[in-house]
Every structure is written in C-alpha cells, then in structure tokens.
C-alpha cells in the first residue's frame, strides 16, 4: 500500500490570495492593481491572469528516473486507450512553455507499477517522457490506470525546466468516468476498488485542481487533458 504525504514547498494559490488580502488591508490597492495589469502572483490571484497554479503533491515510492523519451508508453499492455494531452504554462503569465520535459508514470490496468511487485520484470511500462512543443503541449498514448489498495485512480507527473524539477504532482479522474471505464474488461475482473476521490489522502489536499478533463473518443478510448501552471 502506498503511503504518501503532501509536499508543501511551493506557495499555494490560497496563500497568494492571502497575500493580496494583506496588501488590500494595508492600503496597497494601487500596487496590487498595477501588478494585476501585468504579470506575477497578484495577477493570478486577482483573475487578471486566469491559469491556476497546479498543487504540488508527493512523487510517491514508485518513481524511476531516466525514463524513455516516447509517446506510446503502453508496451502492448491491455486497457482502455487513453491519450494524455498535458499543457505546461508559466503560472505567472499563462504563456506556454516550450521545451519543458514532462515525465509521467502510473499503474497498469491491473494496478501494478513497472519495477515493483508483480510488475518488477519490467522497469518501463506505463512510464515515459515527452518535451512540450511550441504550444506547451506534451502528448502521451497510454491506457486508463487501474486501481490499487489505498489510493484513488491517478497518474504521477513531473515537469522539468533547464534541468530543474519545477513541478511534482498527481493527475486525477472523475469517479463517474472511472466507474464507467471499469465496467469493461480488463478492469471488470477486479471489482470493489476500495478508495475513491473523496477518501483519498492525497486527493483531498488539492486534487480537485488536478482533475483531468476526460472525454470519450467514440472508439472505446478516452482523451484526458489538463493545463499545469508551474513556477519557472
């Protein structure tokens, strides 16, 4: 069972909001207004800049560095096809970040991680790296993750810029969508998942801001998308 604790080494949007409130209380309205017209934390908090800082979350115990640079990370393993469209933007300006390295890893349809437990014979399935394009977009072809005891369904992600990790997080799915996906094979062979979003110790600490927008592609597969605002 995976035991994880939330990382809090970067400011949350709530803290930024508190900072703005302090300035307003001290008569700093003009200063805040000036910054809101441009860039920076106050612009994000005021709504002048509309991207949202993605919450920091633990990388968990299943990270393996040096993953392959590739789009398809399934290695032929079964599951509902899932195309991940992950956009990376500067949290202070909402401008797309070209050339960011996006690193993802998650459990297969059976709830196993490569390199660990029943998945130890391989260190590569459901793991991969992509660089963002000029639009800040990285795309992965994978399968909808399976569940394992003690955790809701999720995908791990890291974003690197210039050799530095600027974001460590987890991406989540609506329980309604997961319930639908899990009615079909191979997921239906593992009923009674024990943890949903509302009682997941990681999700309850900001996971609602890291929910993928998931849509059916009409061919039995899905597309999941999210924009991740990061500090550069």
Image: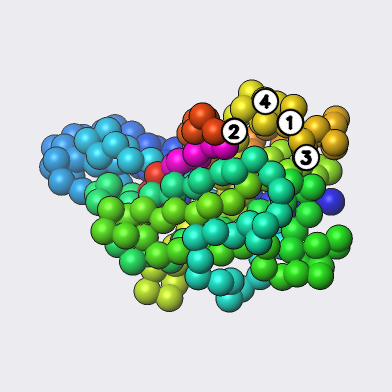
Q: CA distance from mark 2 to mark 1?
A: 10 Å
Q: CA distance from mark 4 to mark 3?
A: 13 Å
Q: What's the mark number on residue 220? A: 2
- Residue 186 place in picture, x, y as percent: 77, 40
Numbered disc 4: secondary structure: helix
Q: Is residue 11 left or right of residue 60?
A: left
| Residue designated by label 3 | 186
Q: Nearer the viewer, mark 4 or mark 3?
A: 3
Q: Are marks 4 and 3 in contact (CB under 8 Å)?
A: no
Query: Nearest the camera: 173 or 11?
Result: 173
Q: What's the mark number on residue 180? A: 4
Q: CA distance from mark 1 to mark 3?
A: 6 Å
Q: CA distance from mark 4 to mark 1?
A: 8 Å
Query: Nearest the camera: 165 or 5?
Result: 165
Residue found at x 45% / y 41%: 225
Query: Nearest the camera: 91 or 195?
Result: 195
State which quadrant residue 153 falls in: top right
| Residue designated by label 1 | 184
Specify the segment rendered in magenta.
221-226
């Amino acid at each position: 069972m995976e035991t994880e604790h939330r990382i809090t080494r970067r400011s949350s949007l709530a803290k930024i909001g508190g900072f703005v409130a302090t300035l307003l209380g001290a008569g700093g309205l003009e200063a805040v207004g000036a910054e809101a017209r441009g860039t920076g934390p106050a612009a994000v908090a005021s709504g002048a800049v509309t991207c949202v800082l993605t919450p920091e979350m633990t990388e968990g115990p299943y990270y393996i560095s040096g993953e392959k640079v590739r789009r398809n990370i399934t290695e032929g393993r079964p599951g509902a096809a899932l195309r991940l469209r992950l956009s990376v933007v500067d949290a202070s300006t909402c401008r797309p970040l070209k050339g960011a390295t996006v690193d993802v890893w998650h459990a297969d349809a059976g709830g196993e991680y490569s390199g660990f437990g029943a998945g130890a014979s391989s260190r590569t399935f459901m793991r991969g790296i992509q660089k963002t394009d000029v639009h800040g977009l990285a795309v992965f072809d994978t399968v909808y993750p399976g569940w394992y005891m003690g955790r809701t369904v999720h995908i791990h992600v890291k974003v690197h810029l210039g050799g530095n990790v600027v974001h460590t997080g987890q991406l989540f799915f609506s329980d309604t969508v997961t319930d639908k996906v899990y009615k079909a094979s191979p997921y239906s062979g593992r009923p009674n998942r024990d943890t949903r979003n509302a009682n997941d110790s990681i999700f309850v600490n900001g996971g609602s801001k890291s929910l993928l927008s998931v849509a059916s592609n009409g061919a039995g597969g899905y597309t999941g998308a999210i924009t991740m605002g990061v500090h550069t």
